[in-house]
Amino acid sequence: MIAAELGADRVYLVSVDGDRVTVSHEFGRADMPPLRGVYRGSDFPSAFKEIFERTIVYKDVRTQSDFTDLDKRSFAGLGAVGFMAVPIRQGTDNLVWAAGAVSSRPRTWEPSEIALFENAVERTWAALERARAETALRDSEDKFRTLFERMRQGYDECEMIRDAHGRAIDYRIIDMNPAFGRIIGVDVATSRGRTAREVIPGLEDAWVDLMNEIVQAGAPRRIEGEVVVLGKWFDVHVYPSGGDRFIAMFEDITERKRAEAALRQSEGRLRDLNELLEQRVRDRTAEVRSLFERLVAAQEAERRRIARDLHDQLGQQMTALRMNLEALGIRQPDAAEQVARTKRLAEGMDRSIDGLTWELRPAALDHLGLLPALFKFVSDWSERFGVPVEFEDDGESRRLSPDVEANVYRLAQEALHNVAKHAAASRVRVTLSFGESEIQFSIEDDGRGFDPAAAASAGDGIGLISMRERAALIGGHIEIRSGVGSGTIVALSVPTP
């Protein structure tokens, strides 16, 4: 119709995307070749530039002074001589759509015709935009309805119900999706428009109060709660939608909650069992430690008894033997040489008895204390095994409890026994210091060393275990530092009252 009113041979509509120009609709004379298709705006350089700014009107494109040869050839390809085009822009520079009128002869376009065409183009664009918006809205509504009908989460739109004083007493369920009915166990068709208490008889007041609180706060909230009357737990997202209205989306999490409760119960039983086992371990450890304490005490008592018996009985007997040998040598001079050999043998036995007595229970430990006993033991050990020993103390010797002195002494015996047996050391350093609140004792050698962890895993660490147990008995801490080829340090600290 617009083509007839303008007296144009053809009117067409185009969409513009950058340099891409698409002719989507055309109206006019049937004897003219069709223009539908895709063109390049750059084939009309002067006209394409100008249409970005305003409506363009040409009486005869063949004589247009600012046209390039490319403009003229491109318009000739369209069968256009007289030409008019109206642009539609989004923003200042974004050309998105245009309409053109073409005449196959030179044409003077009247102002009324230009105004008519501009008005028609604007109305057509508005109609097209409205149609697109309505289509998009229908598509969106269709998609929403599909989602609404198919979503697995429950969905309901609600409005609070208040009494005369404005107090929330219930809420009405305006709409709901099929999943609502499936999860809650009600018929959707008969439940729409009813109150929550009608749909779920016995619904707790807490749910009404909670929805009212969210509506009044005006902010979305996620909650987990149980509807006791249904025996179900729900994960609910609540969105205030203005006034007293809100939207709720929820899903049934009852199985998850039951699993969590079962897990907590299982964890509780496991925790109780673990505590019971730990207590049994503590009790058994205490029993073993107590047994070890009694064993060590009995061992020390037996050592003391044996040492005393050796000293009192064998010692006296050896003294008597030497005296008898001396008397025999006087009475029988001709047996003097044999008596002398027997006497030397008796003296050696006497020294062995003294050494054995010292090993069992050194008298100096009972009468003089730890420092003199250790010094004597270390000196004898060095002479016996031919390993030089450097002994250092701080000169602050004092008496300790019998248990502490005995166990520190035994630790020193075990450590030096290991040096003699395994270390192949060329020198040893022993230190003993008495602090205000603890004693420090260490034995360091330059021997071949070992891997403590490997020794323990291989079952070769019985002596080390015994040393640790002895340290624990007197409340001390022992540290054994060693490495293959780097010697060994045994360091003991024991708190003192």
Image (cartoon, rainbow, N blue to C red):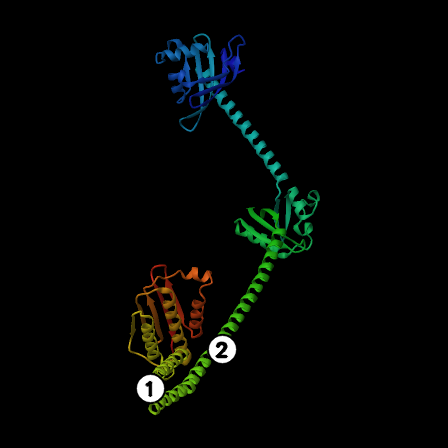
Query: As drawn, is 321 to the left or to the right of 22?
Result: left
Question: Is label 1 or label 2 in front?
Answer: 1
Query: As drawn, is 396 to the left or to the right of 360?
Result: left
**Is residue 344 something that shows in the picture?**
yes
Amino acid marked by disc 2: Arg
Provide residue 370's location: percent of width, then percent of height. 35, 79
How far is mark 1 from mark 2, CA to CA? 52 Å
**Is residue 108 something that shows in the picture?**
no
**How many numbered discs, if any?**
2
Provide residue 176's location: percent of width, then percent of height. 64, 43
The residue located at (56%, 62%) in the rendering is 271
Q: Residues within 10 Å of mark 1 (few under 14, many from 20)?
A: some
Query: As drawn, is 173 to the left or to the right of 310?
Result: right
Provide residue 419's location: percent of width, then percent of height. 36, 67
Q: Secondary structure at mark 2?
A: helix
Q: Is 367 rendered above or below residue 490?
A: below
Query: Which quadrant does the N terminus fall into?
Result: top right
Q: Nearer the viewer, residue 64 or 330?
A: 330
Q: Nearer the viewer, residue 287 or 42?
A: 287
Q: Are marks 1 and 2 in contact (CB under 8 Å)?
A: no
Q: Secondary structure at mark 1?
A: helix
The residue located at (54%, 28%) in the rendering is 132
Q: Is 312 rendered above or below residue 150?
A: below
Looking at the rendered structure, which numbered label has been put on residue 336? 1
Amino acid marked by disc 1: Ala
Hey, which quadrant is residue 51 in on the image? top left
Provide residue 437's location: percent of width, then percent of height. 35, 76
According to the image, label 2 marks what residue?
294
